[in-house]
């Protein structure tokens, strides 16, 4: 089932945070390699013009309050990238827990919550290959070993810095715990070696206090926390977001979204369902019309009714959607949907709730339409600015490598020599 596997990649990204890229230090080799230093090297160059226009903006996946700073230092201080070091022996922190209702850890007013059943999705060689490729580095093997110890992962976030992950599995061998210890993160084990929690220390202590208390009444919970418990009953993988007012901007068809929920059933024929809540009935109707337009556009462009199995019904400001069977969830139809602008918007709706997660992606079908001979401004007009650019300045023919992200997939690069595409995306 393609979509659950793709959504699981979001869960993996919560465990394996990518290093943030700060402003470049334009000295030494960085001055020659980082294109963002172009104005220092030659303020009159075309590259400098693009820097000033914002084309070469910094690419930062992981400004997650807490995971970078609060776990290993003061929550409000900029996080320095920790140097990789061997995991040191640690005395485990263990707290008693008389139940296994782990979702009690969620803040009643959580803005984001998600649950991932790794025991099912990581049985797929397709997902493992998509996430980790074919390389066999020592660090990558450690990450894979840690993930294989996990059965379930739940995540909750409440602004500004309440960020907690709870994982269950078989952690006796220490692969997952060792991965966290090596980054200066000290997990808390819940009762035994089959459940552990990580997060900024204040958030962890607050979550432990909630776990020790009876479950609050549904009426006292916010929408995200309440909806999470509903989806967790019969969905193996689910995501719920309720971003703060004003978080969504721009001209996206989903900019008026105020709440989003998506759940997958992985057993039997499989299905997905959920809802989008807009800020008005008029905008909810526009969103429904956009889905119908995407159905027609994909069918006309590819000859495949990739979204035909997706049904959408509106009730006031709420759009409820469902899809059953493998017609959308797997195979060619799923690939076509994810590769289109629909995939871009779906990914953005999911990623927008996760603090610091990159939401800017490009439809794979657009990216793959870039051909050799296209000019730099044509590429920017078609795709927008790249996520990152590397360049070696001082060559007789200026050369740049541009990187773009596709929804739920890998980053692809293309090469430009003297402002002309000489190597198509790969």
Image (cartoon, rainbow, N blue to C red):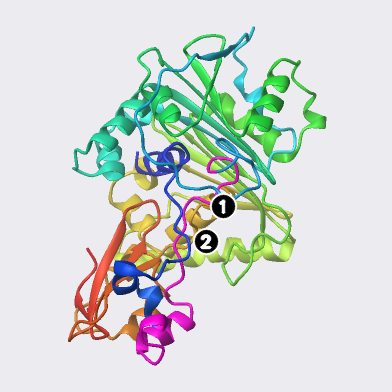
Neighbourhood count class around disc 2 (C-alpha, 10 Å): few under 14, some 14–19, many 20 upward: some
Q: Residue at x 60, y 20 (%)?
A: 102
Element assignment for label 2: helix
| Image spot of residue 109 (x, y percent) | 74, 38
Nearer to us in this view, 102 or 300? 102
Q: Is residue 64 magenta?
A: yes
- Could you say which quadrant of the image residue 89 lies in? top left
Q: Quadrant of the C terminus?
A: bottom left
Q: Residue at x 64, y 27 (%)?
A: 204
Magenta-drawn segment? 39-68
The reply to whether dot 1 and dot 2 touch (C-beta < 8 Å) is: yes
Neighbourhood count class around disc 1 (C-alpha, 10 Å): few under 14, some 14–19, many 20 upward: some
| Residue picked out by circle 2 | 291
Q: Is residue 229 visible?
A: yes
| Residue picked out by circle 1 | 312
Task: Decide if residue 189 is on the left or right side of residue 28.
Answer: right
| Image spot of residue 271 (x, y percent) | 45, 37
Q: Distance of mark 1 from mark 2, alpha carbons?
A: 8 Å
Nearer to us in this view, 69 or 425? 69
Q: Residue at x 40, y 44 (%)?
A: 3
Q: Residue at x 37, y 59 (%)?
A: 406
Task: Decide if residue 126 is on the left or right side of residue 406.
Answer: left
Of callouts 1 and 2, which one flags the residue occurring earlier in the amino acid sequence? 2
Q: Quadrant of the N terminus?
A: top left
Task: Decide if residue 350 is on the left or right side of residue 407.
Answer: right
- Could you say which quadrant of the image residue 425 lies in? bottom left
């Amino acid at each position: 089932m393609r979509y659950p596997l793709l959504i699981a990649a979001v869960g993996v990204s919560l465990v394996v945070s990518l290093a943030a890229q700060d402003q470049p230090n334009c000295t030494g080799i960085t001055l020659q390699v980082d294109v963002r230093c172009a104005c220092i090297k030659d303020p009159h160059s075309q590259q400098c013009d693009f820097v000033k226009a914002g084309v070469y903006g910094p690419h930062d996946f992981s400004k997650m309050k807490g995971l970078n700073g609060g776990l290993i230092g003061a929550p409000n201080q900029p996080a320095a990238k920790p140097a990789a070091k061997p995991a040191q022996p640690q005395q485990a922190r263990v707290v008693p827990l008389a139940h296994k209702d782990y979702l009690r850890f969620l803040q009643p007013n959580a803005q984001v919550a998600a649950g991932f059943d790794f025991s099912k999705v990581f049985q797929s060689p397709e997902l493992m290959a998509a996430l980790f490729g074919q390389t066999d580095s020592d660090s990558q093997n450690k990450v894979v070993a840690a993930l294989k110890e996990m059965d379930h992962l739940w995540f909750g976030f409440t602004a500004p810095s309440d960020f907690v992950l709870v994982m269950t599995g078989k952690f006796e061998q220490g692969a997952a715990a060792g991965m966290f210890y090596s980054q200066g993160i000290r997990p808390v084990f819940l009762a035994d070696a089959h459940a552990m929690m990580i997060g900024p220390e204040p958030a962890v202590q607050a979550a432990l206090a909630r776990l020790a208390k009876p479950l609050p009444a549904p009426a006292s919970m916010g929408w995200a926390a309440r909806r999470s418990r509903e989806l967790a009953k019969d969905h193996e993988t689910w995501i719920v977001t309720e971003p703060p007012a004003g978080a969504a901007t721009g001209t996206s068809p989903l900019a008026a979204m105020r709440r989003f929920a998506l759940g997958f059933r992985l057993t039997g024929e499989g299905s997905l369902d959920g809802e989008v809540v807009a800020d008005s009935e008029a905008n909810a109707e526009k969103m429904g019309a956009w889905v119908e337009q995407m159905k027609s556009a994909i069918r006309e462009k590819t000859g495949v009714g990739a979204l035909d199995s997706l049904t959408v019904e509106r009730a006031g400001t709420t759009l409820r959607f469902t899809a059953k069977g493998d017609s959308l969830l797997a195979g060619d139809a799923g690939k076509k949907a994810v590769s289109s602008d629909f995939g871009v918007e779906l990914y953005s709706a999911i990623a927008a709730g996760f603090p610091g997660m990159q939401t800017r992606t490009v439809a794979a079908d657009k990216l793959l339409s870039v051909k050799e001979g296209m000019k730099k401004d044509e590429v920017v007009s078609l795709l927008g600015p790249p996520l990152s650019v590397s360049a070696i300045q001082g060559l007789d023919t200026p050369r740049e490598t541009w990187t773009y992200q596709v929804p739920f997939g890998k980053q692809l690069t293309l090469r430009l020599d003297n402002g002309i595409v000489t190597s198509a995306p790969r």
